[in-house]
Image (cartoon, helix red, strand yellow):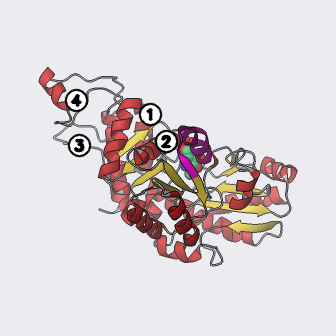
Amino acid sequence: MKIHTKAVHAGDRKKAPSQIGVTTPIYTAASFITSSLAEQDRIYGAEEQGFAYQRYANPTNAALEEQMTALEGGHGCLATASGMSALLIALHAALVDRTHSVICSRDIYGATIKLLDGVFEPFNVNVRYVDLTDLNALDASIAAEKPGAILLETISNPTLRVADLEAIAQRCRAVNAALIVDNTFATPLLVRPLELGANIVVHSVTKYLSGHGDVLGGLVIGDQEHHEMVRYLSRIYGPVLGPFESYLAMRGAKTFPLRMERQCRNAQGLAAWLRTQKSISRVHYLDDPEHPDAATIWRLLTNGLYGAMVTFELAGAQKPQIFKLVDSLGLVVNASSLGDVHTMVLYPWISSHREVTPKMKAAMGVTESLLRVSVGIEDLDDIIADFEQALA
Ligand SMILES: Cc1ncc(COP(=O)(O)O)c(C=O)c1O
């Protein structure tokens, strides 16, 4: 089955004899009654699949998890309360039986840096940030750090760098490090990292997959070894998604490939227009033949879609000029998220990368003049018209 079909059908209408809802309902019950104590015993003993207690599993979450496993591949999925809790549990699961050392892409979401530096490092996990688009630099740090895990974003937030996933996966296999990939920006429509050798894929389901700006949630989709550890840890510390959010995420995800295709086309159109504007000094978008990672992008993104994020620099701008531009936008929403149906703008300097050190910001190219646009499904002409009037 192809991805559009899986998005619509996977997870719902299980064992449908007749008179069963076309969608999976919201199960709010905290616990589940079994036909006998012996059945409960089999469920707790994992001899039988079933539901006993909401922290362990819930039918609404199970439907979403099945849908997401179908979209990304892999052995199974855990739906979590946020993208950050998905990253936390993925890293924890990866490091359980390995060296407590992580190589993380230098180009990454600010809160992920905070998670590594503020939560893992104090527990004696060694964290090293490396430009993963430079395989020589990666080889040198693998030799020095002997990492237990390597973490990267398929398309990095916000500067849209793309590292060679397959080459990194090969290196991970050679040293028994787990490869964790945050696939939030790319989505499984563009890249499916598990098929390229990753062990765990993480999503903020808050973004493209749910797509309507009304859910906060995360996903951890793993190969067999890691999925079992993720579920084991989740049963203990329980960062699970609530059933209402699960329902909304699943509902949104049915149309995600459709929305994403249009968002990618709109983003390509907006990037092309921004490149013609004198006041814009640089446009970051993945269809650019001059992109520093162009060769990897052509190899990895094979369906002619280059993502729906566009990042640009307003020539010579500092905070006041950026504030003026953003405050002049009308249709485009100024809010801290991405992937919604509406076009959104975010200023990484004051938000997603605010607490990243100046040195790291400079290394990853997050400057005071950089704005990130998450392009929505509106008519492209209207999106461009809004930027045009705001830039005038
Ligand atoms: C690439 C990426 N990963 C993870 C997250 C965290 O997701 P959440 O806000 O759902 O915790 C974000 C949030 O913006 C993100 O952009």
Spot occupied by residue 309 in the image (x, y as percentages of width and height): 61, 59
SS at badge 2 = helix
Q: Main secondary structure of the magenta part?
A: helix
SS at badge 1 = loop
SS at badge 3 = loop
> Of tags 2 and 3, which is closer to the observer?
2
Amino acid type, mark 4: Tyr
Distance between mark 1 and mark 3 Cα atoms: 25 Å
Distance between mark 4 and mark 1 Cα atoms: 19 Å
Magenta stretch: includes residue 211: no
Region rendered in magenta = 113-127
Density class for disc 4 (Cα within 10 Å; few <14, some 14-19, many ≥20) is: some
**Is 130 situated above or below 88?**
below
Mark 4 near ligand 1 (CB under 8 Å)? Answer: no
Amino acid type, mark 1: Pro
Q: Which residue is mark 1?
A: 239
Taking 27 as reference, is 307 left or right? right
Q: Earlier in the sequence, mark 2 or mark 1?
A: 2
> Of tags 1 and 3, which is closer to the observer?
1
